[in-house]
Image: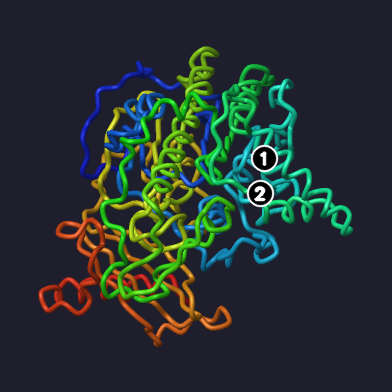
Amino acid sequence: MNRNFIRGTFTLLVPFMAQALHAQSDDNGRLNVLMIAVDDLKPVLGCYGDRYAITPNIDKLASAGTVYNSCYCQQAISSATRASLLTGVRPDSTEVWDLKTKIRDVNPEILTLPEYFRNSGYETVGIGKIFDGRSVDTAQDSLSWSYYIDFKKYIDPEYRWSSFFNYQNPETVAVAKKYIREAEDAGMTGYARMMYALKYIKPSTEAMDLPDNAYPDGAIADGAVDFLTERKGNEPFFLAVGFQKPHLPFTAPLKYWNMFKRDNVPLAKYQKRALGSPDFANHRSGELKSYTDIPPVYTFSDINNVVLPKSKQRELIHGYYACVSYIDAQVGKILSALERLGLADNTVVVLWGDHGWHLGDHGLWNKHTNFENATRVPLIVHIPGEASAVISNPVEMLDIFPTICDAAGMKIPAGLEGESLYHADSEDIPLSDDRYAVSQWPGGQNTMGYSIRTSRYRYTVWLDWKDRVLDTENIRAEELYDYESDPYEKVNLVDSRKYRGALEQMREIWNEYKMKNIK
């Protein structure tokens, strides 16, 4: 089969991995799929130009595949973005905009990516976090999987599974036990006991001299390798591996912390609010402030936002990078198993982060915005036998579902709202320079913000969204940022005379999107 990527602005890379001349597919021309999901991963990777990151395994994968340098999530929160990616439709179609709505409660007949592969004769297996557990049934969406692996059985037996938020520090666990007993004495059971204890003991970081599989992600990698090693049968597989870090808390084995010197940790260069940005475009970093070692911080002036002491900023950023290196090592174990088992030449590998993360820029921490650092994600696609490239044009996570189908030799199902970035049996087709990506975020004060990202600009329009009813005529605020002149989003340019032409152009794109996608 002649398989060609849609090409955009790109740079060829010299691969670290030898590529197969011809992918070995099954009798129907289909390849295996390994999909690796990483929670809260922004593009702090060597292959994305981050000089501080230490990610040799992901960089090696990138050197043999295609790196999408400008990929954007549909909504910067786990449930919504994963529901969108795994069904191939936007949050306004899934109606999953929060952390509690179940996908099939709203759309019982909706088709998921792994379900489509399962229905097509693949063995579909998941381990770790693929869907956000709050948006599916207790079987991680039973229609999607041949079976789901319980990673807990791969925790190192020398380290007791504490069942307390993945912490392993004995002092933390001891304090937690005290509060769990208090909760039990008050009649609490199950999850409520843990949530009670977390009000009192919930550190944002942990660095312990432990093996990788003392924490969940090491066990998840071991379970994935075990599946690849022990799998039986000739049907192709769709293996989805979901890593939990670098989501808070930043808990990783000490050796990954020791890769970095804290004094060299890069702090965000601009830590104030974008001048002229509306209040509901920002937030007060509530997720971070739920951790018990975060000092009281709050917002007051026009441009100042939540600012932590520099020492705590460095600790958190150090922890984030340590967790990314920890995940990189786990990815390396799985890719090495593919090579060792002779599966690399007939397996499509796709790695993505579910949304970005603020590390002090704009004084923000966590995700939950429409800004660049919350919406931009890594996306790497490796197909055996394909040349490597870096694509700079904007793409969306919505494009992953059809792209995986195309790359694996599967027909693309009807009804998807994304676009395949790869076409089998076709000539190279340019990736249009006028492409744009759309993210959305339900801000405060009953608003929904839609953010249009082109190769140069970001335009965000905030609409009235009272009781989840969108009023497209009631524009509450607009934002415009020029990444050529203002890469840190310092100033909202919507009132600038110099940018009137750009603003009108972006409004036209918004109106085009609105007519096509908002009913």
Taking the spot 37% from the left edge, 29% from the top edge, the residue there is: 54
Q: Earlier in the sequence, mark 1 or mark 2?
A: 1
170 relative to 46 in the view: left or right: right
**Quick one: quadrant of the N terminus?**
top left
Eyeballing the image, is 240 above or below 459? above
- 3D distance between C-alphas at marks 1 and 2: 7 Å
Between 435 and 368, the one nearer to me in the picture: 368
Check disc 1 and report the residue beneath it: 172
Label at residue 308? none
Amino acid on which the number 2 mark rests in the picture:
Ile
Taking the spot 49% from the left edge, 71% from the top edge, the residue there is: 442
Colour convention of the picture? rainbow
Q: Secondary structure at mark 1?
A: helix
Give the x, y percent position of residue 80: 54, 59
Give the x, y percent position of residue 220: 62, 30
Quarter-wise, where is residue 62 in the image? top left
| Badge count | 2
Quarter-wise, where is residue 462 in the image? bottom left
User: Mark 1 and 2 residues: CB-CB less than 8 Å, in contact?
Assistant: yes
Quarter-wise, where is residue 480 in the image? bottom left
Give the x, y percent position of residue 242: 57, 38
Amino acid on which the number 1 mark rests in the picture:
Thr
Res 474 visible:
yes
Give the x, y percent position of residue 494: 23, 76
Q: Residue furthest left?
A: 498
Taking the spot 31% from the left edge, 58% from the top edge, the residue there is: 271
296 relative to 474 in the view: left or right: right
Q: Secondary structure at mark 2?
A: loop
Between 266 and 451, the one nearer to me in the picture: 266
Res 126 visible:
no
User: Label 1: how many residues lie within 10 Å, few (<14), some (14-19) or many (20+)?
Assistant: some
Check disc 2 and report the residue beneath it: 201
